[in-house]
Amino acid sequence: MRYGLKNRIIEIALIITGALCLMIPAFYNGYPIVFSDTGTYIGSGVELYFPVDRPITYGLFIRATGFNGFSLWATVFIQSLILSYVLYLFMRMVLGGTFRYRTACVIYLILAVMTSAGWVSSMLLADVFTPVGIIIGALMLFGKLNKANLFFLSFIFLLAAAAHFSHILIFSITFFIILVLRKWLMPALLYPKRYFRAIALIGLTLSSIFIMRPSLDRGKYIIFVSVMTCQGITQEYLKEYCGTKHYRLCQYKDSLPNDYACASWFNYSPSSPVARLGGWTNEMNEECSDITYATLTKPKYILLHIQASLKWSFNQLISFTTMAGNVPLLEGTPPLDRVRRHYHAELQQYLSSKQSRNTLTVYYYQWNDILTAVIVISLLLLLYTFIFKRSLYHGAFGYSAALFFIAIILNAWDCGTFSQVNYRYQSRVMWLLPLLACLNAALLFAKTERRKTAETAAESK
């Protein structure tokens, strides 16, 4: 009894320590890191309105965890605590009997200071729930969980699924692939239960649509046409059909840009056609809906969609550095406005943070060079193990590695195809590779130690 209580206290202390490690970027900044979207999240949760371009879910999470205006530090701590908790369970599952508390501490620290994990969990964005959902999926499919953990993780997974539009496709397709390839990607001994858990994960993901629906219905077609504009598909279609179709966008067909960053301009700039035509209205959404369906049902444009999807997905896959967009967000920006209005006691901290003083990204290139090197080294280690130590892949580590790679690729495809290429989108999941590499190294070390022990025992006889 004493042993169990002692270990439970150590576990709680370890998870809290892990959360604090993951908050290192926020501590370094002097305040939780914000992005231009942060203001909308805070506003939607505290002021209780459905944004046109994102779910209200993460906004409500901010309201609940920030204690309705008490502190945004509390929000970052709780989301880091959730990530630390699922990481702890995942490390225990993969390492099994070789799990050591000191190993977990080292992995937490590596993830916090040498990958984008700390950056993602230190930022006031729904991005943190993308890896949370993926890791929970691995735990539910490949791990042994008691009923309490299973129930709690199911609740967190539903929250994660409903936190961002992109999660609908990323999560549901990932677990559907696992379901289809279950003979190779699920442990045979636990197959029946895991089969139903995969169906449950898909069901939870799809049920999150009902939570997101008020926002999803209002802006999904405008968002997709903005992506088509960046890809040049909208311009091609309007030039061909504006003679017979009386779209309001036709008057802008010759002035629409097509580059990786034009989606934000199309959706939010005061000079964009959307703003000039009245904003995100039902009329604009219906017009964009008509354009979307037309291009998805004509062979010429289907081919253009496929070509653009392949190109943009690849570019998204290799775009995973951090700090992009974490510029000073001061007067006239939604984040400052919402902090001033709803978290006034923290206004001075916000204004004196490194981000607000434009010194947060001073090491931008050096940091991202390290980040890229860590990803490359992780891939090389995982490849070496797969070729020369393949037995290591027979178990939870191998199944989880397959799931993570599928999810990482789908994240690039989903964001590249239905949004714009953005470094932030891929950085939220790319750190799962260094996580796998750390566990890979721990398993290799444990295997070496066991062999040495066995050899020593044999020699002593």
Image: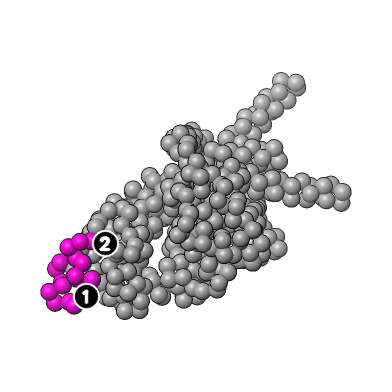
Which residue is depicted at the point 69% across and 45% down? 17
The C terminus lies in which quarter of the figure?
top right
For the residue carrying disc 1, how many other residues have a C-alpha within 10 Å: few (<14), some (14-19), or many (20+)? some
Query: How far apart in space, not on screen, are marks 1 and 2 (Cα)?
Result: 15 Å
| Amino acid marked by disc 2 | Thr
| Amino acid marked by disc 1 | Tyr
Q: In front here: 314 or 39? A: 39
Q: Is residue 47 above or below residue 325?
A: below
Q: Is residue 460 left or right of residue 70?
A: right
Q: Please give the residue where the numbered disc 2 appears in the rendered image.
A: 229
Residue 102: which disc?
none
Q: Are marks 1 and 2 in contact (CB under 8 Å)?
A: no
Residue 247: which disc?
1
**The magenta stretch spans residue 247:** yes
- Residue 123 position, x and y percent, is 54, 52
Q: Is residue 409 left or right of residue 341?
A: left
Which residue is depicted at the point 70% across and 64% down? 147
Q: In front here: 44 or 319? A: 44
For the residue carrying disc 2, how many other residues have a C-alpha within 10 Å: few (<14), some (14-19), or many (20+)? many
- Residue 406 position, x and y percent, is 44, 52
**The magenta stretch spans residue 432:** no
- Residue 344 position, x and y percent, is 61, 60
Could you say which quadrant of the image residue 243 lies in? bottom left
Q: Is residue 367 left or right of residue 232?
A: right
Give the magenta range. Answer: 239-256
Regarding residue 49, the answer to whether it shows in the image is yes
Could you say which quadrant of the image residue 157 lies in? bottom right
Which residue is depicted at the point 48% across and 54% down? 330
Q: Is residue 298 above or below residue 262?
A: below
